[in-house]
Amino acid sequence: MSILARFSPDSMTSKKYDELVALLYEKGIHPAPGLELEVCYGDGDKMKVSVLFDTMEDMEAFGAKIKPVFEEVGFDPGSPEIVEVHNVIRRDL
């Protein structure tokens, strides 16, 4: 069952998000196995991130990999809202 996690860190800016994503790519952590979709949205200094994973195990494995990186740079993503996904509709490419 797919899992959606929504993060709303207190001080996530678009610049900070871009820096974190670049760092995760640089370290070979991103894109994570089982990651279906990542969406970053919001206004300048109040960005939010939603991630859709194939399974809870995939999401937990990704979390275990990013936690030390985030601690290293002093970023606290806060606790996500986690929900099981009933359905995902994808457009045909």
Image (cartoon, rainbow, N blue to C red):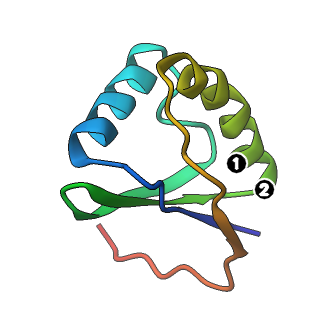
For disc 2, the neighbor class at 10 Å (few under 14, some 14 to 19, many from 20) is: some
| Image vertical order of residue 42 relative to residue 63, above or below | below
How many circles with numbers are drawn on the protein?
A: 2
- Give how far apart the Cα atoms at labels 1 and 2 are: 5 Å
Residue located farthest toward the front when viewing the structure as drawn: 10
**Could you tell me which secondary element the residue under label 2 belongs to?**
helix
Residue shown at 44% from the left, 55% from the top: 10
**Quarter that holds the N terminus:** bottom right
**Could you tell me which secondary element the residue under label 1 belongs to?**
helix
Q: Locate residue 43 relative to residue 55 in the image: left or right.
A: left
Where does the image place residue 28, in percent across and percent down from the top left? Answer: 49, 18
| Image vertical order of residue 81 relative to residue 33, above or below | below
**Quarter that holds the C terminus:** bottom left
- Name the amino acid, label 2: Met
Q: Nearer the viewer, residue 92 or 48?
A: 48
- Name the amino acid, label 1: Met
Q: Nearer the viewer, residue 29 or 8?
A: 8
Which residue is tagged 2? 56
Where does the image place residue 35, in percent across and percent down from the top left? Answer: 56, 49
Residue shown at 30% from the left, 29% from the top: 19
| Image vertical order of residue 45 relative to residue 67, above or below | below
Q: Can see residue 34? A: yes
Q: Are marks 1 and 2 in contact (CB under 8 Å)?
A: yes
Q: Can see residue 3? A: no
Q: Nearer the viewer, residue 27 or 49?
A: 49
Where does the image place residue 79, in percent across and percent down from the top left? Answer: 66, 56
Q: Locate residue 85 relative to residue 88 in the image: left or right.
A: right
Q: Which mark is residue 59?
A: 1
Where does the image place residue 13, in percent across and percent down from the top left? Answer: 27, 48
Q: Locate residue 83 relative to residue 50 in the image: left or right.
A: right
Q: Nearer the viewer, residue 54 or 27?
A: 27
Q: Which mark is residue 20?
A: none
